[in-house]
Amino acid sequence: MKILDRYLAVSILTSTMLVLGVLLALFSFMQFVEALGDVGKQNYQLADAIRYVLLSLPRQAFEVFPMAALLGTTLGLSALAADAELVAIRAAGVSVLRIVGAAMKVGLVLAVIAVLMGEFLVPETERLAEQGRTTALKIRIKQQNDFGLWLRDGPAYVHVGEVLPDLTLLKVDIYQFDENDRLRLQTSAKSGRFEDKQWRLKEVNESWLAENRVQSRRLLELEWGSALTPDLLSVFTVRPEALSVLHLYRYISHLEQNKQNTGPFALAFWQKLASPFATVVMMVLAIPFVFGSQRSGGIGARLFTGILLGLAFFVVSRGFGYFGLLYGVPAVIGALLPTLLFFGLALVMLRRVH
């Protein structure tokens, strides 16, 4: 990397890290204030609230990376413009595209960091955060209605009354059907735990129809061979946005095999794939605003413009994705189109200042 590229990269990267730190401090404070509302409930104490906020930092960093890149690039280059360094750089014959190239190199580094965080760090810390919170508050995971969780496992339908934070299942009912869609076997269990790569059901009652009458038997324990795993069930304890791309892909495949709706998880999958690209796009978008407004405002004005752009991108990307789900737009379009639109805006504006 040449001296100029290194100088620009250091300026942009330093400003981006500064902005990221400020954004994380702001969002963490807001989350901490919200978490204080639960302190004193059940076993939830101040230390639990602090632990929850700290473990949520990687997820928050991943989510605000594009905005931090936009504001950091704007701040870094605006500082150079305020000291007339950009004017000197341009007077030396350095093109805007050369500066864009330096910014993109930083963007690629940040994109790689975002991918590593999203795949390895965020899923684990988010799981620990939610597990600690639900355990302290004695929350049991239920579906968004009073009927528990309904899952499909091949030809069988599974009903789970409750899922504990450690993914222990309570009130398990398994309905197995034959090739003619007639109920063949109904299994009820008080609880179930995943041990030695399979489920072990406790206090089991099995019922089936034989010779025009119902027969049944009781078992203290039963091994249940199922395609459902704790990894698949963990989607009910962690938001889809906090899952890894690989985990989302596996769960989407499971839903597709069982002909179930994949919408929210497919949207989260494509949004996570688009996030690193969005970070680079936001850095490129900041450059024409810096060069185009050197005579019309100071750093404050440029940062204000960057904040508005960042909020616009956040609203458009989230809103378009969810509206797409409502109106049947493919998840890949709902996730990628906002980033592509802002990329197109960046290219148009770069042509104007080039």
Image (cartoon, helix red, strand yellow):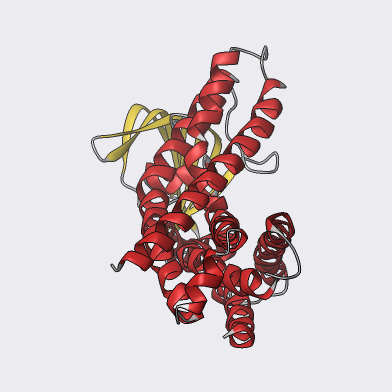
Residue 200 appears in the figure: yes
Q: Nearer the viewer, residue 267 or 292?
A: 292
Position in image of residue 223 (x %, y %): 30, 37
Q: Is residue 94 above or below residue 294?
A: below
Residue 169 in view of the camera: no
Q: Nearer the viewer, residue 49 or 175?
A: 49
Residue most extreme to the left = 196
Q: Which residue is drawn at 52% across and 64% down?
A: 85
In the picture provided, is 50 more to the left or to the right than 38? left
* Quadrant of the image containing the N terminus: bottom left
Say which residue appears at 66% left-offset and 41% top-offset. 147
Residue 83 appears at what percent x and percent y? Answer: 58, 58
Q: Does residue 293 appear left or right of residue 270 in this picture?
A: right
Work out which quarter of the rendered image holds the C terminus and state it. Answer: bottom right
Relative to the observer, which residue lies in front, 237 or 9?
9
* Position of residue 38 in the picture relative to residue 123 (left or right): right
Q: Where is residue 221 in the image (x, y as percent from the top left)?
A: 33, 28
Q: Which of 62 and 82 is in front in this view?
A: 82
Vertical arrangement, residue 351 with respect to residue 157, above or below: below
* Image position of 268 (left or right of 229): right
As drawn, 88 above or below 125: below
